[in-house]
């Protein structure tokens, strides 16, 4: 009888495969309250590496980290009409505290535009206080009706940036720079996901924004995942909270603002973009563990050699773990590391030691080969970069192969059954967008004819990317 697969095959049941992988690779568990999650150490390690990479880019963009309370007075949210209407169904509201009913209910933050603007209005007095560039790493709560671990959870972790500028042009340029140079660069060059950068339609725009820029990734089953967004808020929140700065003389002007964020949803995107039937495949630039050196047997000489190899790899900058747990069967350990998607396994046993070789297993392209132990430190950095490039290439090839040009609503729905459709926005328009929504298909973003991000929805030649989405 054939041995049962460790994971449900993707082709049989992609959602079941996703859940199997999260469980067996020890990434997360469901929390005790519906829609919450417990992120396990290996899964949190992925998020920590994402944080490190993103935080460096955010600081390079001039933003400083701060922290704002998670409880927001309910009346703050009512100040910006579109904002409160957009978030009302997702709010968690606290009505009692300390054994008493609160005089005013407080909202657990679904996002922080309102409370941050309360303080921006105090901190900004003159043009010399601008631009004000703030970021925070925090948790937020949105009461999710259809939760799925990492993708849609009632509580999730993220960063949210908030900025205030003297002019529309400065705010627009900053939101665009975050979209491309921070998010786009990270997702392409670290996550290895070939995201499409575009503009959200008015229907899909962030509540209270005048423009939303998005990054959309195609997952392994052809569906789309919104990986991150950067919003131009215009002066909507500035007017609601009276956030102004002084011009020459006594005249005051409302600031122009942006907000932008990415979350632990990126972990889900990583899984569904790169995972296969054997488990996760982690991009080497992201991986907390780029290589694991496994002792096949508990021979003293073998144990000494795997530790020596680990030290040599660490010395050339490879993030490495030595697995010398020989009380656990080698086969089980090898499968566990494969499930976790560590880019490279180096396996050493007594026979390898006699030959001066090790077995090199590459998780991303697959396959094994015998390699001289003395050559490992020189080979590994180049191999990791090759495999990083391969993941991005595979992501791009999948997206291109499963994206088709369509001309009608019916063709768009058909394309969305297995991938993405690309349709003229002038032909589709808001009416066509509404018809697509009736069939579970959405306009993920609008791109210009040349693939760039358009300045307006109605720019000539705009193309809508349509898909089923997570």
Image (cartoon, rainbow, N blue to C red):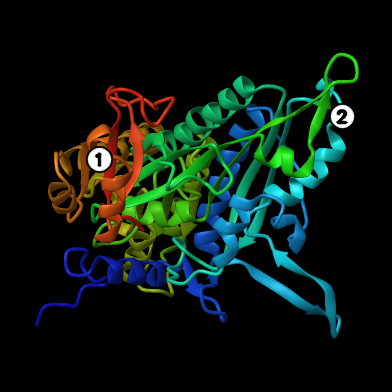
**Is residue 148 something that shows in the picture?**
yes
Q: Is residue 86 left or right of residue 192?
A: right
Q: Secondary structure at mark 2?
A: loop
414 above or below 401? Answer: below
Q: Nearer the viewer, residue 217 or 291?
A: 217
Picture disc at residue 428: 1
- Residue at (46% x, 59% y) in the render: 303
289 above or below 62? Answer: below
Q: Secondary structure at mark 1?
A: helix
Q: Residue furthest bottom?
A: 99
Residue 450 on image: x %, y %? 28, 22
Q: Nearer the viewer, residue 52 or 376?
A: 52
**Is residue 360 something that shows in the picture?**
no
Residue 417 sits in which quadrant?
bottom left
Picture disc at residue 125: 2
- Residue at (44% x, 42% y) in the render: 202
The first of marks 2 and 1 along the sequence is 2
- Residue at (46% x, 31% y) in the render: 185
Residue 73 on image: x %, y %? 78, 62
Count of number-bearing discs: 2
Badge 1 local density, few (<14 within 10 Å), some, or many (20+)?
A: some
Residue 276 sits in which quadrant?
bottom left
Label 2, label 1: how far apart the Cα atoms are: 45 Å
């Amino acid at each position: 009888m054939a041995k049962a697969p460790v994971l449900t095959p993707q082709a049989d049941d992609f959602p079941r495969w996703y859940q199997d992988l999260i469980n067996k690779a020890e990434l997360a568990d469901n929390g005790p309250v519906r829609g919450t999650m417990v992120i396990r150490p290996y899964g949190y390690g992925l998020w920590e590496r994402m944080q490190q990479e993103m935080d460096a880019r955010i600081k390079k963009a001039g933003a400083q980290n701060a922290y704002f309370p998670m409880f927001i007075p309910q009346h703050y949210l009512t100040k910006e009409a579109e904002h409160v209407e957009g978030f009302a169904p997702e709010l968690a509201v606290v009505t009692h505290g300390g054994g008493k009913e609160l005089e005013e209910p407080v909202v657990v933050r679904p996002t922080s535009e309102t409370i941050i603007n309360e303080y921006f209005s105090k901190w900004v007095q003159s043009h010399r206080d601008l631009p004000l560039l703030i970021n925070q790493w925090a948790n937020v709560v949105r009461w999710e009706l259809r939760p799925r671990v990492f993708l849609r959870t009632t509580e999730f972790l993220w960063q949210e940036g908030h900025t205030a500028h003297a002019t529309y042009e400065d705010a627009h340029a900053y939101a665009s720079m975050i979209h491309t140079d921070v998010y786009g660069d990270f997702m392409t060059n670290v996550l290895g996901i070939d995201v499409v950068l575009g503009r959200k339609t008015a229907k899909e725009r962030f509540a209270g924004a005048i423009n939303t820029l998005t990054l959309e990734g195609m997952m392994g089953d052809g569906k789309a995942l919104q990986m991150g967004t950067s919003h131009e808020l215009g002066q909507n929140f500035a007017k609601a909270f009276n956030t102004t700065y002084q011009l020459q003389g006594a005249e005051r002007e409302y600031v122009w603002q942006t907000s932008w964020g990415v979350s632990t949803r990126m972990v889900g995107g990583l899984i569904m973009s790169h995972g296969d039937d054997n488990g996760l495949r982690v991009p080497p630039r992201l991986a907390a563990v780029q290589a694991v050196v496994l002792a096949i047997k508990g021979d003293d000489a073998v144990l000494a050699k795997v530790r020596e190899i680990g030290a040599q790899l660490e010395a050339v900058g490879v993030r490495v773990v030595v697995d010398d747990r020989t009380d656990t069967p080698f086969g089980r350990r090898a499968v566990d590391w494969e499930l976790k998607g560590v880019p490279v396994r180096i396996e050493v046993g007594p026979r390898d030691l006699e030959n001066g070789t090790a077995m090199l297993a590459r998780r991303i392209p697959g396959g094994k080969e015998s390699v001289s132990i003395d050559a490992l430190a020189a080979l590994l950095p180049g191999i990791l970069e090759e495999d990083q490039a391969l993941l991005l290439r595979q992501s791009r090839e999948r997206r291109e192969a499963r994206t088709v040009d369509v001309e009608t609503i019916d063709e768009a729905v058909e394309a969305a059954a297995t991938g993405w459709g690309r349709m003229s926005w002038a032909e589709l328009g808001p009416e066509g967008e509404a018809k697509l929504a009736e069939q579970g298909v959405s306009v993920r973003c609008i791109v210009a004819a040349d693939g760039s991000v358009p300045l307006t929805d109605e720019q000539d030649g705009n193309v809508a990317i349509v898909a089923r989405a997570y």
